[in-house]
Amino acid sequence: QKEVEQNSGPLSVPEGAIASLNCTYSDRVSQSFFWYRQYSGKSPELIMSIYSNGDKEDGRFTAQLNKASQYVSLLIRDSQPSDSATYLCAVYAGNNRKLIWGLGTSLAVNP
Amino acid sequence: NAGVMQNPRHLVRRRGQEARLRCSPMKGHSHVYWYRQLPEEGLKFMVYLQKENIIDESGMPKERFSAEFPKEGPSILRIQQVVRGDSAAYFCASSPGQGTNTIYFGEGSWLTVV
């Protein structure tokens, strides 16, 4: 089992819809969770971090964490074509002192 | 610009030459990470450094690759005797270290081996 898993996609949603991106992780002692966005040919850009169970909202983005079920999700409300990118989930367990990355989910928002 | 600075942005090397990629972390950050990303693939961790120390190099190929983060100056990723398979994007990221593990990426260095 991979340590951090994401559906590779592509996930296709119409403009204005809610895009839901999911990530599961295997290490129960994971402490910190991050979502990054990467446009083609660019570097990853931090969108959200979340550390506690529940929801965390920032503008159109909401991160949801459920440690009991070992998943973290990212919701993008009112999706725009400019949101079309690959979304990377990263998890920090502490004991290995580095982030563990998923392979990313490709999102396409269609006008 | 207070962000993570990488240079060169694009580098072309012939097979057998050396490539040196430089990374200056964000102001106040003492931890540097190097990642490699092959076309259409995910991020691969290479090495994690603090000033003058390699903390984790588990993702670094055993031969031809080395990294340093001296007391003064940028972190350097060095690839000796490059081969075509080394063609990739190399991303540097930094973090403050103590108390946070959020990392911020530079714009990347694209290495092409011809």
Image (tube, rainbow, N blue to C red):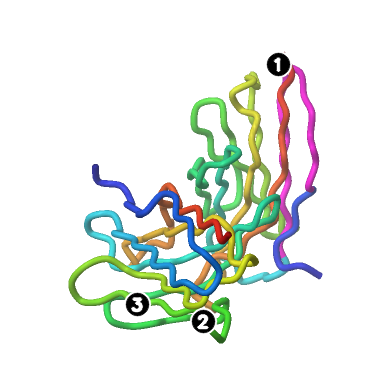
Give the quadrant of residue A70. bottom right
User: Residue B8, position in %: x, y?
Assistant: 37, 53
User: Residue A103, position in %: x, y?
Assistant: 70, 55
Query: What is the magenta segment's predominant secondary structure?
Result: strand
User: Residue A98, position in %: x, y?
Assistant: 51, 70
Q: Which residue is mark 2?
A: B64
Instruction: Name the chain under label 3.
Output: B
Q: Would residue B81 be counted in the magenta stretch? A: no
Name the amino acid type tagged 3.
Glu
Q: Please tell me whether residue B86 is drawn above or below residue B10 in the rendered image.
A: below
Image check: B45 left or right of A107?
A: left
Labels 1, 2: front one = 2
Give the extent of the magenta segment.
Answer: A8-25
Which element carries disc 1, helix, strand or loop? loop
User: Residue B68, position in %: x, y?
Assistant: 34, 77
Instruction: Name the chain under label 1.
Output: A
Q: How many marks?
A: 3
Q: Would residue A21 be counted in the magenta stretch? A: yes
Which of B64/A37 is in front? B64
Contact flag, marks 3 and 2 (Cβ < 8 Å): no
Image check: B32 left or right of A59?
A: left
Q: Which residue is mark 1?
A: A15
Which element carries disc 2, helix, strand or loop? loop
Name the amino acid type tagged 2.
Arg
Q: Please tell me whether residue A32 is drawn above or below residue B49 in the rendered image.
A: above
Pick the quarter of the image with the N terminus of chain A.
bottom right
Residue B68, which numbered label? 3
Q: Residue at x 48, y 56 (%)?
A: B12
Contact flag, marks 1 and 2 (Cβ < 8 Å): no
The reply to the same-chain question for discs 3 and 2 is: yes
Q: CA–CA distance between discs 3 and 2? A: 14 Å
